[in-house]
Amino acid sequence: MTTQIQLRDCAKTFADGTRALAPFDLTIEGGETIVLLGPSGCGKTTILRMIAGLEFPDAGGKITFDGDDVTHQSIEKRRVGMVFQSYALFPNMTVAQNVAYGLKVHGVARGESDARVKAMLEMMHIEMLADRAIDQLSGGQRQRVALARAIAVQPRVLLLDEPLTALDAKLRVRLRTEINALLRKLGITAVYVTHDQEEAMALGDKIVVMQKGKIAQIGTPHDIYQKPQNPFVADFVGASNRLGGQMRDGKLHIGPGVFDGPGNAHSLHHGPVDVFFRADGLSTCDLENAHFSGDVAAVSYLGERLRLTVSGIGEMPLIIDTDPDHAIAPGSKIHCRVNPDRLTVFPADGGNSSASASATVI
Amino acid sequence: MRRDWKFYSQLGLTTLLCLFIMVPVVMSALAGVTVNVFKGLSSGLTLRWIFEVWDLYAASIMLSLGIAMACLLVTLVVGVPLAYVLVRRPGRLTRLFEELLTLPVAIPGLALALALLITYGGVGGYRTSWLFILTGHVLFTLPFMVRSVAAVMSAMNMKTLEEGAASLGAGFWRRFFTVIVPNAKPGILAGALMVVTLSIGEFNLTWMLHTPLTKTLPVGLADAYASMRLEIGSAYTLIFFVLIVPLLIAMQTLADTKKRAPKRDDTLEDSL
């Protein structure tokens, strides 16, 4: 029993006139985990809250759960499970009472409720915390309780609003893996909001990348990572190096190099282009094979690779990975060549892509 | 640890200050159980004055307790939802309302009483009933309840808690009584003690509003001071102490436990 969710023509304008979301359509198939990914303020949380029933779309928008129109239904009636960044556990109740709360509200009989609470706590590996007070729990334990509480009522959709953001890095990865296994096991429709690209890749069947109240791209993690459809998405999923180039006679010209061009380059017309790539888009080489030469501004040793920040090639410093055994010191000169199959090319937008402002490094 | 002269001088000063406050209290209390205060303790101790006060003013004392309880009830029923609205819907209107609410604390009780008399003085039955005094007390104590509850409510991330409860299917009233009120309990309790203490001790307002038949404890106290033997006035003070001190101690204890709220950080245990 999984629920398909459809949002049709949903837009959101706040009371003060701010347009939080441009009209959009989104379909979430039953049992699918969809991740809303984007920087803060992009509208991803507003979409989640619309599905929850905590925000309502502007007139004309329509939200259905398995065909039932829930557009004007309040959150209490929608049977959604919610997990918040700040946990939202009730401090006046024990762990078990928190998990039992929704069951009590839905009038589940005492015996059945007790059994269900026990099963939930066991599933989240926190059965020994049942009688603890909430303020005696750590962040990770709290989020487990929050998950157990949300799932206990067997919601039609599970909504997770940056559930791991408040946790430290190691715990985040651990709990992420557990949530992933949990979602597969339950086969529940889930919507997960995050600004963390890695989290999105690990959890999503599909990723919706959001930019300034608009959907920038919807696709599988593989699509989003390998075939970003615009500079914003490319940048957001880690291809934050940028070089200028030219398309001429179907060939891509970058500096002195001429290439057949990567997959999406054929569709481009004559003219200037922006080339996006990750740290593997350029590799170091000797002088005679080189397309570019630059100055090493910084070096960081990452164990399995050496990460160089190189200036003097593009407008912005480029990030290039190389063999960790190379002895390269900051200030030295390096030569590098382009790996054409690692590039993503878009028509130039005049050099002020909003993407580069929020450049992230993989 | 060796204690130097600083320690002893501070101890001395503190003791002196405590004595300055405590001695009059003890003297007054003693006067209330002394046979003849002008002869001093040598005249012997007695409970006679206490009984006499009870005979004379039992009605006033009971009325005060009654009004305090009624005042508590009203400020709870009105104040807790009010605090909720003020915290949940912050805006210019609620800000203005909060200021208005605090006004009775700022203006002298006499002025407030006068305003009440001018407005409702002509309403016979109301003017002469204890409800008239209750009105004054509620106006005066409500801001204390609202402030105390609102402070706790704004510290508890009420919006997310409510959203959590709503997502589990709980409607407004259910959320209010199972999540909001229990978590606001420290503020409600502190506010309640404050309201009862203030109501029992309120004199300014009450003195203006009272009639011979609606005399409260402090008004009776003034009456006793003015027209009775000193021993009776003192015995009356003693009764007042016995009523009010436990409330003050409870208030203090509550404030202390709030400060010692347990806190827990992420630990190794979390990697279970």
Image (tube, grey):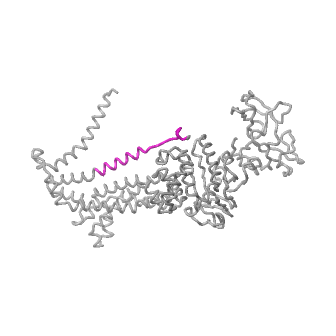
Residue under the point 29% across and 31% down: B8
Q: Which residues are magenta?
A: B246-270
Q: Tell me, yes or no, if residue A63 can be seen here.
A: no
Tell me where residue A13 appears, x and y as whole percent. Answer: 63, 61
For residue B93, say whether it is visible.
Answer: yes
Which image quarter holds the N terminus of chain A? Answer: bottom right
* Numbered label tally: 0
Vertical comparison of A179 with A291: above or below: below
Q: Quadrant of residue B141?
A: bottom left
User: Does the stretch in magenta take in B210?
Assistant: no
Q: Nearer the viewer, residue B83 or A63?
A: A63
Q: Residue at the spot x=22%, y=66% of the render?
A: B213
- Residue B181 percent location from the top left of the image: 43, 57
| Rendered location of residue B202, percent (x, y) | 29, 57
Report the side of B98 relative to A144 (left or right): left
Q: Toward which corner of the image does residue B7 lie, by quadrant?
A: top left
- From the image, give the main secondary structure of the stretch colored magenta: helix
- Would you identify the image quadrant in which residue B144 lies? bottom left
